[in-house]
Structure formats: C-alpha cells, structure tokens
Image: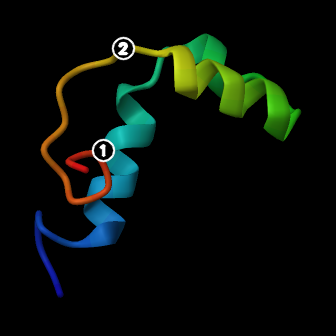
Amino acid sequence: MYGRNSFRYSAASMWNSLPDTFRQYSSYNQFRFLIDQWNGPDCNCSACTR
C-alpha cells in the first residue's frame, strides 16, 4: 500500500504532529503515559479510529 493511506505515511505524520517535548523522552513508560494523556489533533487513521 503506497501513498497517504499507508502505515509509513501515517506514522510519520503522527510523529511530526507530536509536541517536541514528547520526542525528547528516552523512557518508553514516560512516552506512553504522555501519549495516553495527549489530546492532539484529530486523526482519522485506522489506528486512531477505534
């Protein structure tokens, strides 16, 4: 699958939409906690629409 519906494109877009402070954490647990609490931009990808 290529283009804007691909996982590669969606993952990069989601990563780029995160605040810079999220990307600075080296601990998976801290990062995961922040992601769970984050109310970022509305995403319509298959991973977010559950």
**Residue type, mark 2 in image:** Asn
- Tag 2–tag 1 contact (CB < 8 Å): no
- Locate residue 10 relative to residue 14 in the image: left or right: left
Residue 13: assigned label: 1
Which residue sits at x=21%, y=60%?
Answer: 46
Which image quarter: residue 43? top left
- Name the image colouring: rainbow
Residue 44 place in picture, x, y as percent: 13, 44
- Locate residue 12 relative to residue 10 in the image: left or right: right
Mark 2 or 1, which is nearer the eye? Answer: 2
Dot 1 falls on a residue whose secondary structure is helix
The residue pinned by badge 2 equals 39
In this view, 15 is above or below 30: below
Which residue sits at x=69%, y=24%?
Answer: 33
Q: Categorize mark 1 by other alpha carbons within 10 Å: few (<14), some (14-19), many (20+).
A: few
Residue 25: assigned label: none
In this view, 13 is above or below 22: below
Foreground residue among 8 and 27? 27
